Amino acid sequence: MPGKRKRSLIIVIDGPAGAGKSTTAKEVARRADLDYVDSGAMYRGFTYLYLKHGKDRSRLKDLLDSHGLRFEFHSTEARVYHGDTEITGDIRSDSVNSHVSDVAAMEEVRNTVRKLLRQVSRDSDVVLEGRDLGTVVFPDADFKFFLTADPEARALRRYDERIGKGEQVSLDQVRENVETRDRIDSNRDIAPLMKADDAVEIDSTFLTFEEQVTRILQYIRNTPTATTKIDIS
Ligand code: CDP
């Protein structure tokens, strides 16, 4: 139809904590020259605000209506700002880790993030990572992947990652947080963590990072889409 803009290309990677979604999504985005979006950073940003305002549920609507959060997605990290203040480190704090799944289960918060995600992907071709992207936010995504791994492998990866950043944390602490978040994320009533029926499942327990990325890129390369041709380096 003349004048009708081709819709952007959408690739989603869902899965539980520590499955390797972030690193994989960033590398897929880099090699396929797509933008990268981390929906978890948005839930973490809203959790930071909610905690900062004393966990006051009665103020949640106002908080969401005028949140002042800004998200910048780079190939190496998601940067988050509240007004002029960068809160990239704060959204990964222990207190945000402990509360984010409860905040992410709130309907008003999910509605706000869903709108933001649809906005950011309206005009550009993107790889997004999250929990409910293939099922709820982008049911018509061009490609859907569900990345998973054995729970112990996921806890260990997350532990190595945090130790690598110089954080003082124990493996037990990390395992407990990953297990608790998975349980809350999988059992909530609204948009639970779930593989979409038409998502390609990849178990990364015994895969190297390179193998993980290659599987996704090969699948994309071998599957023609109605909307877009992707050049993959
Ligand atoms: O990096 P990791 O997988 O540990 O977590 P994240 O992607 O930063 O997401 C943090 C939390 O946000 C998750 O445990 C979920 O509670 C929530 N989340 C969600 O509910 N839906 C999404 N699409 C993304 C994250």
Image (spheres, grey):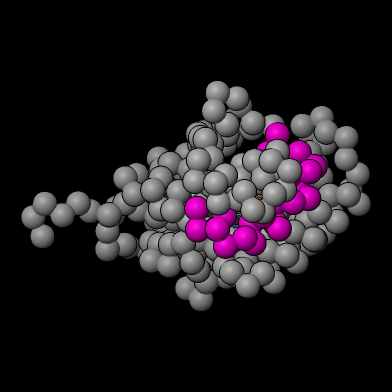
Say whether residue 37 is left or right of residue 7. Answer: right
Q: Is residue 94 magenta?
A: yes
Q: Is residue 120 left or right of residue 178?
A: left
| Residue 23 visible within the image | no
Q: Is residue 212 left or right of residue 176?
A: left
Of residues 65 and 163, which is closer to you in this image? Answer: 65
Type of secondary structure dominating the magenta stretch = helix
**What's drawn in magenta, residue-wise?**
90-112
Q: Residue furthest left?
A: 2
Q: Is residue 51 left or right of residue 137?
A: right
Q: Is residue 104 visible?
A: yes
Identified at 55% across, 51% down, the residue is 61
Residue sitting nearer the eye, 54 or 203: 54
Residue 205, quarter of picture: bottom right
User: Where residue 225 appears, x then y in whole percent?
Assistant: 31, 62
Residue 18 magenta: no
Residue nearest the viewer, comparing 175 with 50: 50
State the residue at coordinates (38%, 66%). 140
Above/below status of 111 relative to 190: above
User: Toward which corner of the image does residue 182 lie, by quadrant?
Assistant: bottom right
Residue 2 position, x and y percent, is 8, 55
Q: Which residue corresponds to the image point at 70% horizontal and 57% vertical from the top-left?
A: 101
Q: Residue lying at the far bottom in this picture: please name it.
A: 197
Quadrant showing the N terminus: bottom left
Residue 159 placement (x, y as % from top left): 81, 45
- Residue 15 percent across, percent down from the top left: 62, 61
Locate residue 85: give its quadrant: top right
Of all residues, the one furthest to the front in this rendering is: 58
Q: Residue furthest top?
A: 84
* Residue appearing at x 67%, y 60% in the figure: 16
Q: Is residue 195 above or below residue 89?
A: below
